[in-house]
Image (cartoon, rainbow, N blue to C red):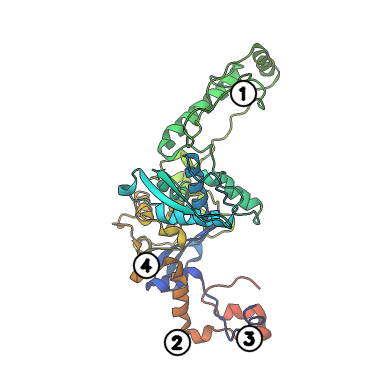
Amino acid sequence: MLLKSMQFRGVIALQESVCAAFGAGISTACVVDIGAEVTKVACVEDGVCIANSRAVLKYGGDDITRCFAALVKRTGFPYRELDLGQTYDWRLMEELKEKWCTLNEADLTVQVYNFFVRRPEKHTQKYQVKVHDEVALSPMCLFFPGVIQRRIEEREINPTFAKHNNYEDINEDAPPISLMNQSAKKNTAAAAAAVAAARAGTPAAGEDNSNPNNTNNGGTTSNVGTPGATPASTPAPSATTPAAAATASTTALTLPPPPVAAPVHHPFDMDPSVITTEKTWEIAGTIGKDNFSSLVALDVVVAQAISNCGSEERSKKLYGSIILVGGGGMIQGFDRVLEDRLFQALPATLTTVEKVEVLPSPRDMDPRLLVWKGASVLGKLESAKELWIKPLEWDLQGRKVLRDKSLFFWGKD
């Protein structure tokens, strides 16, 4: 299209990670590109992208916006007509996310903000809202992607799914981040009790033996609390009617005991600051492949991508030169949180790594433009003259010319 339809005089095929490294002025780096819908991780050494270190995650800055909108909506957001399906409301939440969201601990206090809502053919309205930890919990969804699991699955099933369709689809089954370890232990104990009760033919404590479609179980339950209250992670005990008990006894006598289910590894089943060996081995063979799981935390992917690069000396260089590009990484304190989580998860074999450092953009440049700056620098190099693809060469050789004039391996015909 560039050569034929738009009549460009020449084109150079470059990788975004290589351009980001050149834009930052370094030759070796681990590039973390947090875009709107996807997050890309790739390691670059001497201007060449290491193939085994590439990974693409199907979450990004838009998921932070949706999570932020859902959290403030549940805590009494004054703008009740908020609809992310409308362009002006989506831009409003994008603006509030950029202004309010932070991961600096010093800023995690109760704050009162004013904002303006401008809608077509209506007067500008001014609102006042009080926020607390919502500004920090929403960016943490990149480290705990289980809370946005439903959105990721919908995107994988239907890639053309409207990105602004629904913002209240964060996973309510995922426990709060602060109660992660306690909830994991409770879920494990409840599962063990349910299996033991099923084998014995008696209902477990808190288990509803009535119709599973009957959510009220013969009564009415009212949800009393603040608008932002989070649903309980474990169901409350419910009364069992005699008919339901008889049905449960008959089922227990006629059906064989259910098999013990294999343990399911949930993103919240592990300490957020520690990457276990088992979890690392689960994703060790998927970095650089198309079937990479999008429910893996960002810090886990970065650590595994660097580990796949080979020698200890190379890993040490990459841990000390991490670059954040894209708009998703512009949240205040995000780089410090990523550094802390990576440092706490360092493998025992890397004893020479003294610190993990996320490099700032050179001369306070917008990280969203870092890739374009690197591409412009590469295009002006003297050695880049041999990489230009002219329209005549494309007409004669087609896609085969990409194999001869690319800095990376082109595996397509």
The disc placed on residue 361 is 4
The C terminus - image quarter = bottom right
- How far apart in space, not on screen, are marks 4 and 2 (Cα)? 25 Å
- Callouts 4 and 2 close, C-beta under 8 Å: no
Q: Is residue 133 above or below residue 316?
A: above
Looking at this view, name the residue that lies furthest to the front: 123
Q: Secondary structure at mark 4?
A: loop
- Callouts 2 and 1 close, C-beta under 8 Å: no
- Residue that numbered label 2 is attached to: 382
Q: Quadrant of residue 312?
A: bottom left
- How far apart in space, not on screen, are marks 2 and 1 (Cα)? 73 Å
How far from the left and from the top, in percent, is residue 336?
Answer: 34, 54
Dot placed on the residue nearer the N-terminal end, 2 or 3: 2
Mark 2 residue type: Glu
The disc placed on residue 216 is 1
Q: Secondary structure at mark 3?
A: helix
Q: Is residue 283 visible?
A: yes
Dot placed on the residue nearer the N-terminal end, 3 or 1: 1
- How far apart in space, not on screen, are marks 4 and 1 (Cα)? 55 Å
Dot placed on the residue nearer the N-terminal end, 4 or 2: 4
The disc placed on residue 391 is 3
